[in-house]
Each structure stands twice: as structure tokens, then as C-alpha cells.
Image (tube, rainbow, N blue to C red):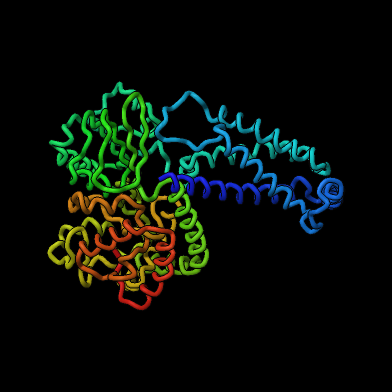
């Protein structure tokens, strides 16, 4: 676990080093120097003079402004990381009455003193003083943002304050309700239950609540329990949500898995985060989603205009339909599609159930009378799903993930099938590149679980690459 934490810190440090270096060099070239061409010559001359006086052993080709800026950023971050002044937000700490600006101002003092001293010491004199002062305010904003991945996640579509949790045996007046992990989330209810005796009741409440609303975190006060029922332990591990366990006793687990443990007020706190799309993992996935979506919408813009014209000619307005679907952790959203069916066609599903050739929540009939004549090709080649790139940009969907279903389809879910709700729904996935036309929802779930258990950026990229071949070289059906 220590090695994993160090790797995470190294990754964050490297990412921040690269980002700050690129931003600083770009800002220097475009604003601090800008059009003042002699400024580069003045600073370069100063650097060469200092090199000849103090470190003549360094070759002249290494005396570059960009290199000195990169070295300064590196030294500054090393100093920042080597103290407790700049630490990443710990979800298992209590919230303090400290505003964003208090945090920002402290970092501002450290950065501005360091940066201005560097500029003065190395005689970076030919720069714009106005832009120099402005830059002392910009970098602290970046540092505060990188200190807390939740801040970046909220900018990319996943806001902590919109998440929910359910608790068991947690007193409302408990000091643990002030933990950061709970304070900013919404409590959907507290239940008093004997965990080891009634763990099936806990599972049932979690399952039912997941069908009704968004659920991100499970909090359980185990009291004096030191060992969980093995089935319940396995259930919590495979739930793919955040789990917070509070116990008076030291907890012995039968399974081997990653968790964080700390002690607060003589209580043992166990934090299990099996939410695979959270923090830096979520941020990286969202960056890829946004980049791919913008590229796809740009490339497909002529096709989008053409399809819009065809839909209007065949069926009039509206061009798009918005359907309520179930998203990440059970949160409902409106999914966009090009209209290929008659108005209010979804309401006719009940009358056509006898013709449905698929089981579970899947619904597909041959020669569907609801489909508008002449638009079947859009469903065959999944062209009707192109507007879902807008859902991806809004953070409601991903390029890759399980296909989102209707809220009424939740009746088909149990504690096993509910796992598919714990990742962002996607436009494509393992199912789409393997068995697009399957009639069995268990096959859907098999690929969804395989995706959840093996998720990685590489797997997402592999699925994205294979999807076009699946669409154009196999018979496909839209959902």
C-alpha cells in the first residue's frame, strides 16, 4: 500500500511538473517577453555571464531560458512537497472552517516569494512587470486545483456535493458526520441494524436505494464487530462504491484487497474505495472522452447536418429525442438520439411486449412498426447515437461503458446486476465489439462486469479503435 501511495504521489508530482513548466514557458514567451525581441537577448546574455562566473563547467548549449524555468519549477515543487504545507486533501480528515481564499493566499505567498526571488537572482530583468505580477496570482490557482482532485473532477462533470451516501448505525450527532468524506455529500438515510445478523437486510436496502436514486458511498458503524461475515465482506468489495467502516475493534478481513486505515477518537476507520472511476482515474478518462467527442463531432459535422435534413424531410421536427436513462451510480439523465421512431414510441413498449424477442430489460422486435420508414439504416449503423457525444461532453456518459437503460428497467436488477450502474454509461463497450445482437441480458452483464473488473485507459482505447470495424462489418441493432 505504501508503494502504491508513493506511485500516486510521483504521478501527481510529474503531472504537475509538466503542466506548470509548459504553462510557465508559454506565459513567458507570450506575455513576460512578448514582442520585445531584445528581451530574450538581454536575459540570455545575463545567463551566459553568470555561467562564466559561477559554473563554467556547464556547456553553453544548456544555458537556455526554458531550461532554467523548468529547473526552477522542479526545485520549487520539491521544496513544496518536502513539507506538510502542501499536502493533498485527505477525505478522512475533519472539515475545518478554512475557505478557498485562505488556502489560496497561503500558497500565493510561497509561490510569489519564490518566483520573484528567482527572477531577481538570475537577472530576468527584461520582462513586463504587469504580467509578472499577474502570473504570481495564476499559479496558486493551479496549485490549489491540483491539491484536490475533487475540484478538477467537479469542473469535468462530477461534483462532490451532488453525491449521496447511506449510513448504518451512525448517530446523527456523531463526530464522524463531520468527516470530509461525509460532510459534503447528502445523507439519504440512517438505519439501525445488527450488521452480522442482518447483513442481507443491509444488501437489500443498498440495492433498493440504488434503483431509486444516486448512491455513491456506504457508511457502516460496526461497533464492536471485529470480523465480517465472509459473504458480506465479499459483497462490499465487489460493490464498486466507496465504503467507510467504523469500528471499536480492529477489523480482520478474510480477503486481500486495498484499503486505508486510520484511527479517530479511539475508533478504527477503514476506507475502501472501489469506485474505479474516481479521482485521477476519472479525470484522465474524462480528458480522453472530451478530446474524442470534440474530434468526432468536428469530423462528423457534415454527416450530422445531412442526417438532420433527412429526419426533417421524413418525419418533421423534432430532430432529436431526449430519453431518461440511468447514469453513474443510479443518477438519471436525458440521453440524446436522432429521432428514428414515431412520436412517443417508448410509451408503446408495453403494448408490444408480446413481440419482444429479447429478455430482461432489453427490448427489440423485428420490423418494429414504430420506426419511421426510410430511417432503418440509421439504427443499423448506430448513426442515431451520434448526438450522445453531447452527453459525453456534459459528463453524463463516456465514450466507453455499459449502455444506459431506462429507469423502469431497474426492476430487472438485483445485487449482481446493479454493478453495471457503478461506471459511466457509454456509447460503445465490450458488448458492442463482441456480441452486438445478443438477445440475452446476462450476456450484456457478462461483458459489463468484465469491463468493470478489467477497466483501464488502454482497454478504453482498444474498444474505441475496434468499434468502427464492429459497426460496418457486422449487422448491428440500436438500443
Instruction: Check the picture and name the quadrant holding the C terminus.
Output: bottom left
Q: Is residue 86 left or right of residue 367?
A: right
Identify the residue shown where x is 68% and y is 37%: 136
Q: Is residue 66 left or right of residue 288?
A: right
Residue 457 in the image, given as x and y percentages of width and height: 43, 59
Q: Is residue 315 above or below residue 260?
A: below
What residue occupies the far top of the structure in this picture? Answer: 173
Residue 399 in the image, given as x and y percentages of width and height: 41, 59
Residue 334 in the image, given as x and y percentages of width and height: 35, 51
Instruction: Check the picture and name the quadrant holding the N terminus.
Output: top left
Residue 311 in the image, given as x and y percentages of width and height: 38, 66
Q: Quadrant of residue 368?
A: bottom left
Which residue is more in the foreground, 365 or 311? 365
Identify the residue shown where x is 28% and y is 24%: 172
Q: Quadrant of residue 121?
A: top right
Identify the residue shown where x is 20% and y is 52%: 413
Q: Is residue 198 above or below residue 377?
A: above
What residue occupies the far bottom of the structure in this picture? Answer: 473
Number of numbered callouts drawn: 0
Identify the residue shown where x is 30% and y is 21%: 173
Amino acid at each position: 500500500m505504501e508503494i502504491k501511495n508513493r506511485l500516486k504521489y510521483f504521478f501527481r508530482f510529474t503531472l504537475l511538473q509538466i503542466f506548470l513548466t509548459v504553462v510557465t514557458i508559454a506565459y513567458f514567451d507570450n506575455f513576460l517577453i512578448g514582442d520585445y525581441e531584445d528581451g530574450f537577448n538581454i536575459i540570455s546574455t545575463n545567463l551566459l555571464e553568470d555561467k562564466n562566473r559561477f559554473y563554467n563547467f556547464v556547456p553553453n548549449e544548456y544555458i537556455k531560458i526554458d531550461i532554467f524555468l523548468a529547473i526552477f519549477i522542479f526545485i520549487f515543487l520539491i521544496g513544496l512537497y518536502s513539507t506538510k504545507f502542501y499536502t493533498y486533501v485527505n477525505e478522512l480528515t475533519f472539515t475545518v472552517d478554512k475557505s478557498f481564499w485562505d488556502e489560496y493566499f497561503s500558497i500565493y505567498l510561497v509561490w510569489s516569494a519564490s518566483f520573484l526571488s528567482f527572477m531577481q537572482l538570475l537577472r530576468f530583468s527584461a520582462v513586463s512587470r504587469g504580467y509578472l505580477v499577474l502570473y504570481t496570482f495564476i499559479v496558486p490557482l493551479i496549485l490549489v486545483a491540483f491539491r484536490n482532485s475533487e475540484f478538477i473532477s467537479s469542473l469535468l462533470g462530477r461534483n462532490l456535493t451532488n453525491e449521496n451516501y447511506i449510513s448504518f448505525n451512525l448517530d446523527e450527532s456523531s463526530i464522524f458526520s463531520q468527516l470530509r468524506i461525509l460532510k459534503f455529500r447528502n445523507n439519504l438515510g440512517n438505519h439501525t441494524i445488527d450488521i452480522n445478523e442482518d447483513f442481507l437486510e443491509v444488501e437489500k436496502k443498498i440495492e433498493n436505494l440504488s434503483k431509486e436514486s444516486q448512491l455513491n458511498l456506504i457508511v457502516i458503524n460496526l461497533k464492536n464487530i471485529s470480523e465480517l461475515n465472509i459473504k458480506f465482506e465479499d459483497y462490499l468489495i465487489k460493490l464498486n462504491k466507496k465504503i467507510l467502516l467504523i469500528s471499536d475493534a480492529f477489523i480482520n478481513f478474510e480477503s486481500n484487497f486495498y484499503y486505508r486505515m486510520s484511527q479517530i477518537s479511539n475508533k478504527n476507520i477503514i476506507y475502501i474505495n472501489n469506485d474505479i472511476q474516481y479521482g485521477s482515474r476519472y479525470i484522465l478518462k474524462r480528458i480522453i472522452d472530451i478530446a474524442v467527442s470534440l474530434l468526432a463531432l468536428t469530423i462528423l459535422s457534415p454527416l450530422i447536418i445531412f442526417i438532420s435534413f433527412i429526419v426533417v424531410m421524413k418525419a418533421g421536427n423534432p430532430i432529436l429525442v431526449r430519453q431518461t436513462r440511468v447514469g453513474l451510480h443510479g443518477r438519471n439523465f436525458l440521453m440524446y438520439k436522432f429521432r428514428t421512431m414515431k412520436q412517443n414510441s417508448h410509451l408503446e413498449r408495453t403494448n408490444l411486449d408480446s413481440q419482444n424477442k429479447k429478455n430482461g430489460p432489453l427490448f427489440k422486435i423485428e420490423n418494429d412498426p414504430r420506426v419511421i420508414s426510410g430511417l432503418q439504416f440509421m439504427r443499423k449503423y448506430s448513426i442515431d447515437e451520434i448526438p450522445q457525444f453531447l452527453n459525453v461532453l456534459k459528463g453524463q456518459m463516456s465514450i466507453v461503458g455499459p449502455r444506459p437503460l431506462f429507469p423502469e428497467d431497474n426492476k430487472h436488477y438485483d445485487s449482481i446486476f446493479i454493478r453495471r450502474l457503478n461506471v459511466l454509461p457509454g456509447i460503445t463497450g465490450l458488448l458492442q465489439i463482441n456480441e452486438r445482437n445478443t438477445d440475452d441480458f446476462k450476456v450484456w452483464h457478462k461483458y459489463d462486469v468484465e469491463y468493470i473488473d478489467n477497466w483501464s485507459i488502454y482497454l478504453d482505447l482498444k474498444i474505441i479503435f475496434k468499434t468502427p470495424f464492429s459497426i460496418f462489418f457486422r449487422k448491428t441493432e440500436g438500443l
